Amino acid sequence: MTNRTLYLIACAAPPARRLDVAIRAAQAAGWDVCLILTPSAHRWITEDAHGEFERLCELTGHPIRHQYKLPSQEDVLPAPDALLVAPLTANTFNKWAAGISDTLALGLITEGIGLGLPIVALPHWNDAQGRHPAVARNVETLRAAGVTVLLGDGGFVPHKPKQGNLDAYPWQAAIDALPA
């Protein structure tokens, strides 16, 4: 059993259909993985007719969180030692850089910067979304804040709209970028 806890924070992008790949790779690297989903990603996972939500709970050994708890409720997850935000959509990325924390996922990654947690971000968006002027500014903003943004060579390379390849998503590059 490890004593390092990783929060895998996933957005609703196609690689979210392969979260088990990331979880297993992180576990093999010695991380205890807790899964946090954006509201849209939660919908994707819970509406899967093949029991994906239950399978991911079993794989991590933890409840999957997707919304803020009430102040009177206890934390059900151990505190994180690092955060991996993957797949990271352009929507969540741009909100994060602006300091918006209107979901549990955004709250955790926004706060993670202030707490000085190691954070790795592995985007997933198409090249048309990536050409929006906010994206380049926000890459600089988050990198200046200490976030490892894996965009471009050695990370995620945006694809043409509707031409993404799930098998090419570089989960292992994200795991390798986490602290040893």
Image (tube, rainbow, N blue to C red):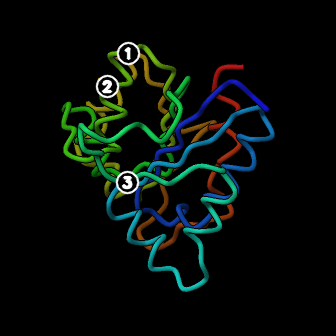
Q: Amino acid at mark 3?
A: His
Question: Could you tell me how far apart the alpha carbons at marks 2 and 3 are, in whole angstroms?
Answer: 16 Å
Q: Which residue is mark 3?
A: 66
| Residue sitting nearer the eye, 131 or 26 | 26
In the figure, 149 relative to 116: above or below? below
Going from N to C along the chain, the mark reached first, 2 or 3, is 3
Q: Position of residue 129 (x, y in %)?
A: 31, 55
In the figure, 114 relative to 106: above or below? above
Q: Position of residue 68 (x, y in %)?
A: 28, 46
Disc 3 element: loop
C-beta proximity under 8 Å, tags 1 and 3: no
Q: Which residue is mark 2?
A: 111
Residue sitting farthest toward the front: 72
In the figure, 25 relative to 71: above or below? below
Disc 2 element: helix
Q: Which residue is mark 1?
A: 115
Disc 1 crowd, CA 10 A, few/some/many (<14, 14-19, 20+): few
Q: Position of residue 145 (x, y in %)?
A: 35, 17
Disc 1 element: helix
Q: Amino acid at mark 2?
A: Glu
